[in-house]
Image (spheres, rainbow, N blue to C red):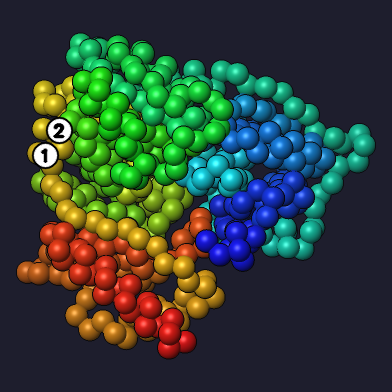
């Protein structure tokens, strides 16, 4: 990553993100929190109730103090949940009838990063219009400070994790899962999921081998649950003779899986498994995922005559679409599964429990289950590229492609149909969390996926040289 990228604070409608020291500081964190508080107070809420949580990163405590200063100084009543998973925080927002919430987490980013994420009263992320309003207040520095006798307050909620556990246990078939006596390996990546997922697994009668489950925040590997970051988990599953292995990112809104043969199934397939189980064994209805997720979702859904709706990348986009169409399951191809019967937000802990229910219902090993589901070849890569030239790049790519169906809702997605069915596709979009362009390609064969990815990267390189 270039030095300019490393020093740039990334501001989006969902919050701010950057490397501690060079981009994200107590100062800009304080300002953005004050902007959020001012936005809440603009809704005629005299003393907004705001929940606060964080993941385990060493910079989290510093960020917590900056956030508290901004909220208390703006006259908010703060309920601090401490170190909890992001979905635990989201579930607690409607429980407390809070006006909003802030989570201090950079999720899948490396340890040197941190971020602030902001939420609505319903537990969902801010939508585009809301986020834009907060950014406008931040840029104008139009804050709503309280006087000396209007300061906010802070109280603790130490029960949020247990409420989340209870919600999950009330959703899955506990007795069925218990009867299987599963042996599970859990890699918590020393993040927030290290505390809650063992509680769920214990309650489900699993024998659990924990790796990287302290709360030090010193990540033993990159926290993004990609196959290349699951080597230790794969080895542990093999060594322990476990039935399955699970890995979380730093805030546990995602989960990745490794079969009993030590094989990662791929981050997209956490959602595919959830879709297959819900539609086959629970209830049928619409499914929602984002534009970058494997077409295996359609293959599974069509077996049950269920429609798949695609939305732009981002939790809020998928969750909102799920609400609109009454989806029974949804999520994103990054290990993020959204179970609307629990909440409209990615929940890696609930997805873990749902996966065990699928495994218990199937009567198969996890490796057999993986082989029984449709599988395509997906390649995800990144290219350093200036964001300000993204629009011109997309226009260039569109002019070069003559045979594809094109979706322009989120960057540009090219779909190549055969006999009315999409058999391969490529999605080019700017990253919302890091300073580069994402290139995602999928096809029925690995050779074709590699060919498409190379073509797209070559086109981007040609554009960069020409411009």
Q: Where 69 falls versus 81 (above or below)?
A: below
- Whether residue 137 is visible: yes
The residue carrying pointer 2 sits among few (fewer than 14), some (14 to 19) or many (20 or more) residues within 10 Å by Cα, namely some
Q: Quadrant of residue 292?
A: bottom left
- Whether residue 409 is visible: no
At x 59%, y 45%, the residue is: 112
Q: Where 343 falls versus 414 (above or below)?
A: above
Q: Quick check: 318 left or right of 157?
A: left
Q: Where 393 falls versus 263 (above or below)?
A: below
Q: Position of residue 57 (x, y in %)?
A: 59, 36
At x 71%, y 31%, the residue is: 78
Q: Quick check: 66 left or right of 353?
A: right
* Mark sitting on residue 367: 2
Dot 1 corresponds to which residue? 371
Q: Quick check: 135 left or right of 324?
A: right
Residue extending furthest toward the right: 148
Marks 1 and 2 close (CB-CB < 8 Å): yes
At x 29%, y 14%, the residue is: 206
Q: Quick check: 240 left or right of 148?
A: left
Q: Position of residue 39 (x, y in %)?
A: 70, 51
Q: For this rendering, which residue is in front, 59 or 196?
A: 59
Q: Quadrant of residue 176?
A: top left
* Mark sitting on residue 406: none
At x 23%, y 70%, the residue is: 452
Element on which disc 1 rests: helix
Residue extending furthest toward the left: 419
Q: Where 175 falls versus 90 (above or below)?
A: above
Element on which disc 2 rests: helix
The residue carrying pointer 1 sits among few (fewer than 14), some (14 to 19) or many (20 or more) residues within 10 Å by Cα, namely few
Q: Position of residue 347 (x, y in %)?
A: 41, 35
Give the number of callouts. 2
What is the C-alpha distance between the residues marked 1 and 2? 6 Å
């Amino acid at each position: 990553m270039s030095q300019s990228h490393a020093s740039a604070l990334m501001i989006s409608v969902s919050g701010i993100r950057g490397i501690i020291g060079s981009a994200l500081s107590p100062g800009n964190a304080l300002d953005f929190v004050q902007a959020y508080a001012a936005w809440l107070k603009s809704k005629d809420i005299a003393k907004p109730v705001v929940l606060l949580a964080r993941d385990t990163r060493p910079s989290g405590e510093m960020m917590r103090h900056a956030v508290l200063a901004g909220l208390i100084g703006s006259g908010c009543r703060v309920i601090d949940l401490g170190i909890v998973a992001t979905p635990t925080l989201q579930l607690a927002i409607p429980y407390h009838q809070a006006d909003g919430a802030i989570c201090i987490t950079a999720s899948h980013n490396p340890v040197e990063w941190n971020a602030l994420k902001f939420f609505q009263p319903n537990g969902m992320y801010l939508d585009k219009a809301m986020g834009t309003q907060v950014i406008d207040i931040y840029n104008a520095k139009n804050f709503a400070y309280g006087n000396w006798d209007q300061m906010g307050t802070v109280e603790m909620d130490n029960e949020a994790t247990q409420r989340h556990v209870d919600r999950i246990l009330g959703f899955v078939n506990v007795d069925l899962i218990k009867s299987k006596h599963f042996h599970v390996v859990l890699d918590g990546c020393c993040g927030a999921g290290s505390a809650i997922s063992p509680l769920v697994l214990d309650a489900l009668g699993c024998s659990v081998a924990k790796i990287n489950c302290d709360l030090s925040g010193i990540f033993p590997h990159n926290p993004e649950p990609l196959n290349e970051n699951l080597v230790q988990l794969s080895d542990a599953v093999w060594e322990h003779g476990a039935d399955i292995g699970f890995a979380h990112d730093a805030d546990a809104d995602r989960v990745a899986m490794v079969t009993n043969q030590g094989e990662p199934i791929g981050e997209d397939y956490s959602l595919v498994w959830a879709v297959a189980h819900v539609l086959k064994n629970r209830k049928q209805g619409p499914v929602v995922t984002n534009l970058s997720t494997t077409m295996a979702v359609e293959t599974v859904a069509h077996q049950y005559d269920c429609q798949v709706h695609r939305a732009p990348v981002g939790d809020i986009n998928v969750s909102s679409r799920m609400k609109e169409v009454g989806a029974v399951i949804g999520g994103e191809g990054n290990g993020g599964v959204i179970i609307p019967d629990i909440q409209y937000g990615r929940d890696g802990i609930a997805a873990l429990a749902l996966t065990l229910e699928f495994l218990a219902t199937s009567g198969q090993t996890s490796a057999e289950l993986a082989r029984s589901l449709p599988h395509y070849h997906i390649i995800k890569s990144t290219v350093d590229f200036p964001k300000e030239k993204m629009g011109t790049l997309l226009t260039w790519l569109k002019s070069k492609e003559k045979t594809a169906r094109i979706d322009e809702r989120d960057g540009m997605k090219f779909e190549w149909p055969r006999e009315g069915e999409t058999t391969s596709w490529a999605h080019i979009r700017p990253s919302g969390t890091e300073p580069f362009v994402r290139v995602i390609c999928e096809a029925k064969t690995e050779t074709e996926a590699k060919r498409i990815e190379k073509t797209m990267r070559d086109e981007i390189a040609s554009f960069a040289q020409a411009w």
